[in-house]
Image (cartoon, rainbow, N blue to C red):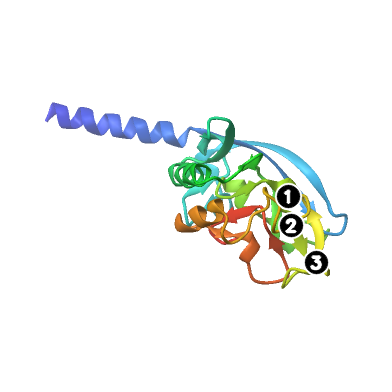
Amino acid sequence: MRWLIAVILLINAASAAGEDRYCTYSTYKWNAYQRSAVEFEEVSKLYSDLTPEEIDTQTDCSICREDQVSVLIAGKHSVQVCKHIAPSIESALSLATNAGQEIEEIRGYRVGMTKGALDGEGNRTQFSNHSFGTAIDVNPQNNGLYENCIDFGAHCILRKGGEWAKDHRLSLHAQSPVVIEMKLSGFKWGGEIQGKQKDFMHFSYSGY
């Protein structure tokens, strides 16, 4: 009986310690009217005070720095992603580089309200997939984000990153090893998303 009581006390202590853990992150809002980042903020709060908007229901990843880990790719590229999906991202990127994929830059975790409806001041109201560490951008200088781009062509407007060219060695396309491996791991590629945007650098579970 004493050992059972001791186990229960240890479980309760661990639970209490978890509730007292702090979550920290830096964030901002994207203003669609100004086309710039506004309202930068440093946040520190208890994990128990996190709102549903601060947790990704699909992966249980939060926007807290404390839930992010660094993944090293090909011995030289480090990217921060959510600890829950880090193994699958590491495996996919390692397989892609082994298959000849060239990666010069990769970006992951960064918190910001860059999607969702606009508030009265033109600010976005939802956290991006990057905010949870569940999205990565590969070679952004050669795989831009385009608007007015249902089908890629001269009418597409480059909004972020560098110009995409199918034949450039760093640009991604449907047969690129990183696109193939990330899709096999359950991610969608932003170059194939439906609608008016094409985000050739981007991978997430939704594609956005």
Q: Nearer the viewer, mark 3 or mark 1?
A: 1
Badge 3 vs badge 1, beta-carbon distance below 8 Å = no
Q: Quadrant of residue 175?
A: bottom right
Position of residue 192 measured from the top left corner of the image (x, y, whole percent)? 62, 66
Crowd tier of the residue under label 2, counting other residues whose Cα lies within 10 Å: few below 14, some 14–19, many 20 or above: some
Q: Which mark is residue 165?
A: 2
Q: Is residue 103 above or below residue 115?
A: above
Figure quadrant of residue 4: top left
Regarding residue 208, the answer to whether it shows in the image is no
The local secondary structure at tag 1 comes to helix
| In the displayed structure image, the side of residue 90 where residue 123 appears, left or right | right
- Closest to the observer: 94 or 43? 94
Check contact, mark 1 vs mark 2: CB within 8 A: yes
Q: Position of residue 47 (x, y in %)?
A: 51, 40
Q: Which mark is residue 156?
A: 3
The amino acid type, in three-letter code, at marker 2 is Ala
Give amino acid for label 1: Asn
Q: How many residues crowd around disc 1 within 10 Å: few (fewer than 14), some, or many (20 or more)?
A: many
Is 14 positioned to the left or the right of 171 in the image? left
- C-alpha span from label 1 to label 2: 7 Å
Q: Earlier in the sequence, mark 3 or mark 1?
A: 1
Q: CA distance from mark 3 to mark 2?
A: 13 Å
In the rendering, at what x and y percent does residue 96 appear? 51, 47
Characterize the local packing of mark 3: few (<14), some (14-19) or many (20 or more) Cα atoms within 10 angstroms. Answer: some
Q: Is residue 53 above or below residue 106?
A: below
What's the residue type where badge 3 is placed? Cys
Distance in Å between CA atoms under marks 3 and 1: 15 Å
Tell me where residue 154 appears, x and y as whole percent.
83, 68
Image side of residue 92 versus residue 132, left or right: left
Q: Secondary structure at mark 3?
A: loop
Residue highlighted by disc 1? 142
